[in-house]
């Protein structure tokens, strides 16, 4: 199939280029100046994408799709449908919100057997290392899982009985084992001693101020400094997740580690809790207002490597407990990640085109060993791409989400740009009726695409990805 007249975001280019893209066998075969490929391959199916932008499919390398074990909150089918709606073509799922956690080949095999029939976009998995494991068990888990996962996850503080926090001594051993295996170690970095110091015992009616005051910026800063000290010469193996404090990001960059932030840390601050309440609750929480601008600047200059969603939805009865301290902490954000960054990052001028591409796909693909197939529009790579109508806008209404949870702080926001279609390995997985305005080929026209968007991929279309072979 040939997609013609697209304004494409290509690697190494500072401006969009108007091109034709040829796709066959799930691979992007050729990119050429607009109008040329149709002449060279007149027998191919043809789609005229005049007026549409083409971006590489976004990668969301931090999701909690909760399967198996917590599927009352989310599962792989609903989670990947929501990802596709938001232009995400690859997700990487966390090991801690599964039962059992992914800390052994037995647990990994069981999880893969369940989710292989569910996903509509491609996916990879992390392994888990936690405080109830011994040094020998950590070493064994890394060795057995390393060829099947793209990294390992651990916590300095944890609220999960099934995945307790790791001790400093075990963390040192874990990061050495991951370094030897050439896999990143992802860390939830908050300092337990700081949290204990700031944890107050509120009265009968705790407030949102009690919650965000209990998890201050100092907890992140001290934890990141401690992690770098423990990592030592293996600091390049360390990756800190969901950083909301700019000083922590700079510490990590200077120390040779990498980090990510999330869209909610760029969009909201602690003053929004009074307005949004439980819809905004995450751990760590959003920070003081000044942090938003600082995080945007650090994302723009590469101090922060990329942006993730930390997708973690929950049903109403777990979210709305009338107690800020017991309400479930998590946002179902994989569907807002790309649209938000497109609107408020690229189109708003906060991010250059190349930094936008790094923040949404290429940097994560490189960090997790997927860049031989994913992360850019380039011949030979998987034909994962998103078509965007830049003249339209997106009014984000939670009722149209495909996630099991529809509780979002982004509710009611309007984003510049609108996704017209999401393609995974050349196949349409999500589309809107905007695609019908082109000379639509049979492979697209057979689907009944609505104005609000339709999932057209079959469950199980998404495939499991592994670290690139070297």
Image (cartoon, rainbow, N blue to C red):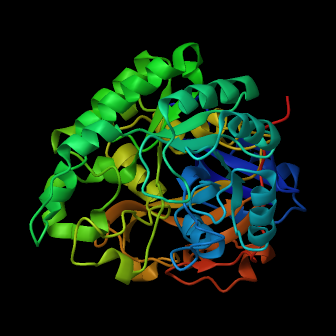
Q: Is residue 435 left or right of residue 142?
A: left
Image: 302 above or below 331: above
Quarter containing the N terminus: bottom right
The residue sitting at 41% across, 83% down in the picture is: 399
The answer to which of 98 and 132 lies nearer the viewer is 132
Image: 70 above or below 25: below
The residue sitting at 83% across, 56% down in the picture is: 26
Q: Residue 342 placed where, x, y %?
A: 42, 51
The residue sitting at 25% across, 64% down in the picture is: 325
Quarter containing the C terminus: top right
Q: Residue 425 placed where, x, y %?
A: 77, 57
**Residue 34 seen by the camera:** no
The residue sitting at 52% across, 45% down in the picture is: 360
Furthest residue to the top? Answer: 233
Q: How many marks?
A: 0
The answer to which of 83 and 447 lies nearer the viewer is 83
Image: 54 above or below 218: below
Can you tell which quarter of the image residue 280 is in? Answer: bottom left
Q: Residue 277 placed where, x, y %?
A: 21, 69
Q: Residue 31 placed where, x, y %?
A: 74, 42
Q: Is residue 36 left or right of residue 222?
A: right
Can you tell which quarter of the image residue 436 is in? Answer: bottom right
**Residue 78 seen by the camera:** yes
Q: Is residue 13 left or right of residue 120?
A: left
């Amino acid at each position: 199939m040939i997609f013609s007249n697209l304004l494409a975001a290509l690697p190494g280019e500072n401006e969009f280029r108007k091109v034709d893209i040829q796709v066959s066998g799930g691979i992007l075969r050729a990119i050429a100046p607009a109008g040329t490929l149709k002449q060279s391959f007149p027998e191919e199916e043809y789609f005229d994408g005049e007026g549409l932008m083409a971006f590489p499919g976004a990668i969301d390398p931090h999701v909690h799709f909760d399967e198996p074990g917590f599927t009352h909150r989310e599962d792989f089918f609903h989670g990947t449908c929501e990802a596709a709606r938001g232009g995400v073509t690859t997700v990487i799922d966390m090991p801690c919100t599964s039962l059992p956690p992914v800390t052994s080949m037995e647990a990994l095999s069981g999880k893969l057997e369940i989710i292989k029939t569910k996903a509509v976009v491609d996916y990879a998995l992390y392994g888990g290392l936690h405080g109830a494991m011994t040094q020998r068990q950590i070493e064994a888990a890394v060795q057995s899982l390393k060829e099947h996962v793209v990294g390992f996850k651990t916590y300095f503080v944890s609220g999960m009985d099934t995945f307790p926090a790791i001790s400093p001594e075990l963390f040192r051993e874990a990061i050495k084992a991951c370094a030897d295996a050439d896999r990143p170690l992802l860390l939830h970095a908050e300092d337990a001693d700081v949290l204990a110091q700031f944890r107050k015992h509120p009265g009968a009616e705790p407030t949102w101020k009690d919650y965000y005051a209990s998890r201050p910026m100092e907890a992140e800063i001290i934890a990141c400094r401690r992690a770098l000290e423990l990592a030592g010469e293996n600091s390049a193996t360390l990756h800190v997740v969901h950083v909301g404090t700019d000083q922590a990001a700079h510490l990590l960059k200077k120390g040779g580690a990498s980090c990510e932030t999330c869209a909610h840390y760029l969009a909201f601050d602690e003053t929004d809790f009074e307005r949004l309440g439980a819809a905004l609750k995450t751990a760590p929480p959003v920070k003081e207002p000044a942090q938003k601008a600082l995080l945007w600047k650090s994302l723009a200059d590469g101090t922060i490597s990329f942006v993730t969603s930390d997708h973690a939805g929950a049903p109403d009865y777990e979210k709305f407990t009338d107690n800020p301290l017991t309400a479930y902490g998590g946002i179902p954000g994989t569907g807002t990640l790309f649209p938000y960054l497109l609107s408020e990052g690229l189109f708003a001028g906060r991010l250059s085109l190349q930094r936008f591409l790094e923040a949404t796909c290429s940097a994560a693909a490189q960090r997790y060993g997927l860049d031989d197939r994913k992360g850019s529009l380039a011949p030979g790579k998987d034909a994962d791409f998103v078509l965007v109508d830049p003249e339209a806008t997106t009014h984000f209404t939670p009722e149209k989400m495909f996630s099991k949870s529809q509780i979002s702080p982004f509710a009611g926001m309007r984003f510049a740009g609108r996704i017209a279609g999401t393609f995974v390995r050349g196949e349409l997985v999500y589309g809107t009726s905007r695609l019908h305005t082109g000379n639509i080929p049979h492979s697209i026209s057979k689907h009944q695409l609505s104005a609000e968007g339709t999932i057209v991929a079959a469950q199980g279309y998404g495939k499991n990805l592994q670290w690139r072979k070297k």
